[in-house]
Amino acid sequence: MNKKASADKPAAFESISQWYMETDVVIVGGGGAGISAAIEAADAGAKVIVLEAASDAGGSTALAGGLIYMGGGTPTQIACGFEDDTEEMFKHLMMASGPNADEDKVRLYCDESLNHYDWLIEQGVVFKPEYYPHKHTNTPNEAALMTTGNEEAWPFIEHSKPAPRGHKPQIEGDHGGIPLMEKLIASAQSKGVNIICDARALTAIADHEGTVKGIVVRIDGQEQCIHAKRGVVLTSGGFIMNTDMVKEYAPRLARGNYPNGNPNDTGGGIRIGIGAGGNAINMHEGFTCTPHYPPRQFLEAIIVDETGQRFINEDVYHGRLGSAILDRPDRRYYLIIDSRHFEILERPPKGGYSVAGVGDTAEELEQEINLPEGTLVNTLNTYNRFAAEGKDPVFHKAEKYLSGLDQPPYAAFDLTIGNGAFYAVMTFGGLDTLPTGEVLTVEKQVVKGLYSAGRNSAGLPRCADGYASGMSIGDATFFGRLAGQSAAANQ
Amino acid sequence: MNKKASADKPAAFESISQWYMETDVVIVGGGGAGISAAIEAADAGAKVIVLEAASDAGGSTALAGGLIYMGGGTPTQIACGFEDDTEEMFKHLMMASGPNADEDKVRLYCDESLNHYDWLIEQGVVFKPEYYPHKHTNTPNEAALMTTGNEEAWPFIEHSKPAPRGHKPQIEGDHGGIPLMEKLIASAQSKGVNIICDARALTAIADHEGTVKGIVVRIDGQEQCIHAKRGVVLTSGGFIMNTDMVKEYAPRLARGNYPNGNPNDTGGGIRIGIGAGGNAINMHEGFTCTPHYPPRQFLEAIIVDETGQRFINEDVYHGRLGSAILDRPDRRYYLIIDSRHFEILERPPKGGYSVAGVGDTAEELEQEINLPEGTLVNTLNTYNRFAAEGKDPVFHKAEKYLSGLDQPPYAAFDLTIGNGAFYAVMTFGGLDTLPTGEVLTVEKQVVKGLYSAGRNSAGLPRCADGYASGMSIGDATFFGRLAGQSAAANQ
């Protein structure tokens, strides 16, 4: 190791005379995907080292709400009185994954969902069999189960039968990632997995044929070589914290003001994988959300842009709304309520929206927030006319939210990007992999000895317009397990 | 060469005992970028071979309208009575390139535009100094000059001073690519460039340090190795003809029904570059257009989607309209005219739009094309009310197109994807390069000996929403020249 390691230049296996450590499987990144991979690799009899760049394991999963998308009739679904069907889950996830869906992964993920649930229980994860019935970003109590995506919203509702599939590990409020990662880390450690923190992977070690045989890692300021006899699993997350990469690969996400992840989501594992011959796909896509609920009363509001027109059914998942807004990021956006919903003015909405204007009439509000004359009035008239009949043939919001907006005065909240509204963003692009976690080249050949899962790879979540909470952690834990199994079996 | 060559496995330079040919510079692809590179490399004293997969050189440039985006006061602009300014051109192209603009390339392209014009003239290209004043996809006569993008449309008009910058090599109608490539190919051949057709490049040849030293090519069914002492220039186009790559990298473009290019635009050069250590960026983006003009009367129409609402200023470049529609590809779209424009019904519009319905009143048309009751009527009322005052505060269409749509009967043309409307698509993603054409790794290091330009690289055109006709060929010829210079200078 004479030169400084760089991800685009794998170190030559044949040139390494001294190993810092030797093991069977090295896993880069100790989040949901990496620890799941470690558990499976250890269960398969492999010696496993996890390299974690931060001072503690957990990754972005530990910081997240912890929802896991599972269905087909999980014990929690059944205990809460819901029926679900693997095929309905498959249909929904195919639609949710958009035009770049990986059907093989969606198929396997759905077919194995009940087994994955059981595996999580085996690791000690607890789901309190209670259903939270409202639209929310997470269950605000200890309840496990809620509907987390667009299942009940048009057009998804027309293509598959909805069921609540978000499962939160037991904890009060929005912190399900903590108990999830605590249980997974404890399980991994009980199986002898060696988690080394403050260890930043720099580049792969590959032999002259390109087979990955280890990793160069910086520990205590020194570049060290670790020999991974069976393989290296890259699970170090996405790149939302790397502003250069976001600008270059996913410029749409640059408009977000809340990068969703941990400070090490800088795409290091993606770059190491590319340097070792892997190929990255779907790099432009990502999660984008502005949480227009709670309060759930906001679903009875309408959202208009600067043309005074609606543009979406307001009962969609907040990620679908965020994506529609990021498609036209330079417009102004307003959420309009009438006096029936004024109790909301008492407490600031979760999305950080300020009040843009109020008006004793629709005309006055329209003028107050500088919309073209007559446009908001027209929009409200049309909306109210149909709402009175319990329908929304224009944007297809569900009847239960069509209370009408015909009780002046009116108020408008400002959802415009840059005016204080909260826009969370997270990347979906990463290494191209088989469902087994094997990393593929640009010609769809396997890079021997290299595996990836979680946001380091292009997994189940592919599309901002269809994403549901729980798909990313569901994907990371499930396909992380497969990657760990594959690496352990590579001897 | 025992194994079959694959783009993801560069051949080892040290293992090659027999060369099929030896030269200074090998150029992969004989289109606008490649032939421009060849001319410059030959001018710099290099021996040059161009490998063309088709049976004749010309590439997608030869099939194109041939418009070249140039400005800052070209002789053609001046002869036609137009002033232009390099800074105004720069401002427009930065905005046109969108959030992923490569400012260094835009800067150089603008600063050198007059020199590039002169260079084209030196190669024998002729621009007839005549201005075509209407909105069109190309000049329908022999005129060279027209406005080809969004320069005069909101919001671009507010950020830079428009000028016509599309320059078509002299020919009648939409075939400017033919005289352009004829002149460039003749120039290259006069300088001793060896153009070998029916020659498909397969993979790079690189030494143990990763420096590119040649190319493996299939000629007459045999895999042959060509030694390129100074470098290899990849200019083999984008990947719009590769349905797998489109689905994987640019799924939005999969909805187009007219791939814009030649059958060899299969991304081969991009994959060879990735295999040799280069990195691909901006892979999701591309040109998308539905030519809603000519007839130019259609600019006086409004375009609505299935909500009965407008969504764009209809006087935008057709690529910006196409992009807005591909953002919501599953909606129905209609172009609405009134009786003042019924002469258009006599001849089919260029976009292949069928008549979706007619109505003696707006209400009747609304019902006929199944829009929610009152929505189209509202939209027309608002549009006409403002048009009568010569303004469009909702979508900002220019006053000259605001003739109003208040003379029933009405008719609607169907712009819905899949109903016969023409949607052309072309990819913008490719190898990450410096303005010099040097190919970069994922860590922004130069891959020695490897260069790229045109749609094989991520060049000037970055963004469907802002693209103007002439940017792609302008980019290909200009940065192709720089890549050829760089390769020739690499000794």
Image (tube, coloured by chain):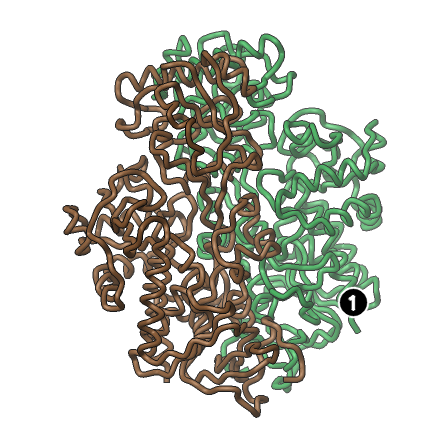
Chain colours: A green, B brown
Residue A334: tell me if it is visible. no
Residue B115: tell me if it is visible. yes
Q: Relative to residue B431, is residue B210 depicted above or below?
A: below
Q: Which residue lies furthest to the front in this view?
A: B346
Q: Which of B93 and A301 is in front in this view?
A: B93
Q: Nearer the viewer, residue B216 or A420?
A: B216
Number of callouts: 1
Q: Relative to residue B342, is residue A182 depicted above or below?
A: below
Q: Residue at x 38, y 55 (%)?
A: B472
Q: Which quadrant: the N terminus of chain A?
A: bottom right
Left or right, A477 with reference to B422: right
Q: Which residue is drawn at 36% across and 71% down?
A: B37
Q: Relative to residue A155, is residue A261 depicted above or below?
A: below
Q: Residue at x 71, y 59 (%)?
A: A434
- The crowd level at tag 1 (other Cα within 10 Å; few <14, some 14-19, many 20+) is many
Q: Which amino acid does label 1 sit on?
A: Ala
Left or right, A135 with reference to A222: right
Instruction: Identify the residue position indicated by label 1 in the image.
Output: A488
Query: What chain does badge 1 belong to?
Result: A
